[in-house]
Image (cartoon, rainbow, N blue to C red):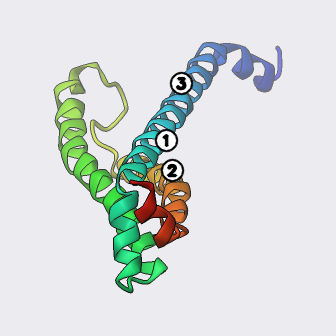
């Protein structure tokens, strides 16, 4: 009789393949969302360069500009989570007939997904926010 380890390994090969594919595609989706979010934030900061320059010229601290850009980014994440979590919960309950041995809603998985999404958005917002905080008011006002 073979030992349980190779037998278990062989019997779970399909599940491990699906796990690897799902993890890879999920990671790719988060990466694409982060790159897209970075692009939209970089564009928004570029369009608001004059406004940011005026704020800095009137005495706004660079920390306030950094906070403004980061809070704008996180507001959209909060909106996405506020819309996405109820849809995920409803989807889980509507698919419960197809789930065997799995709860329709896993609060830990939802919390982890929300945390990963918020972290990806925060990382995507860091570069545009730092660029906005580093704007020279004179250059920003002369440019337009």
Q: Image height check: is 143 above or below 54?
A: above
Q: Residues within 10 Å of mark 1 (few under 14, many from 20)?
A: many
Q: Position of residue 54 (x, y in %)?
A: 35, 72
**Residue 103, horizontal then vertical, whole percent:** 31, 38
* Residue occupying the point 28% across, 42% down: 105
Pick the front one: 46 or 88: 46
**Inter-mark Cα distance, 2 to 1:** 6 Å
In the rendered structure, the answer to whether residue 127 lies left or right of residue 51 reads right
Question: Which sits earlier in the primary sequence, circle 3 or circle 1?
Answer: 3
Q: Is residue 99 above or below residue 109?
A: above
Q: Residue at x 46, y 71 (%)?
A: 137
User: Mark 3: which secondary structure?
Assistant: helix
Q: Quadrant of the C terminus?
A: bottom left
Marks 2 & 1, CB-CB < 8 Å contact: yes
Q: Secondary structure at mark 1?
A: helix
Give the residue pinned by disc 3: 25
The disc placed on residue 34 is: 1
Residue on which the image places disc 2: 124
Q: Where residue 109 sits in the image (x, y, percent)? A: 41, 46
Q: Quadrant of the N terminus?
A: top right
> Do residues under tags 3 and 2 come within 8 Å of each other at their CB atoms?
no
Residues 99 and 134: in front is 134
Q: From the viewer's perspective, is the residue at label 3 or at label 2 nearer? A: 2
Q: Give the residue at x 45% y 55%.
A: 143
Query: Looking at the image, which residue is at 36% across and 49% down?
Result: 47
Q: Where is residue 33, by image quadrant?
A: top left
Nearest the eye: 43 or 49: 49
Dot label at residue 71: none
Q: First in sequence: mark 2 or mark 1? A: 1
Q: Within 10 Å of the Cα at label 2, are there few (<14), some (14-19), or many (20+) other Cα atoms?
A: many
């Amino acid at each position: 009789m073979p030992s349980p380890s190779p037998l278990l390994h062989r019997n779970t090969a399909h599940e491990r393949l699906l796990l690897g594919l799902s993890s890879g595609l999920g990671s790719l989706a988060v990466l694409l969302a982060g790159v897209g979010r970075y692009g939209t934030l970089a564009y928004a900061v570029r369009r608001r360069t004059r406004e940011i320059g005026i704020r800095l010229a009137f005495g706004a601290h660079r920390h306030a500009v950094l906070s403004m850009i980061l809070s704008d980014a996180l507001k959209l994440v909060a909106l996405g989570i506020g819309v996405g979590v109820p849809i995920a919960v409803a989807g889980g309950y509507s698919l419960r007939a197809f789930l065997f041995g799995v709860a329709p809603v896993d609060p830990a998985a939802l919390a982890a997904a929300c945390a990963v999404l918020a972290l990806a958005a925060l990382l995507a917002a860091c570069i545009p926010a730092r660029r906005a905080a580093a704007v020279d008011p004179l250059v920003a006002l002369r440019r337009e």
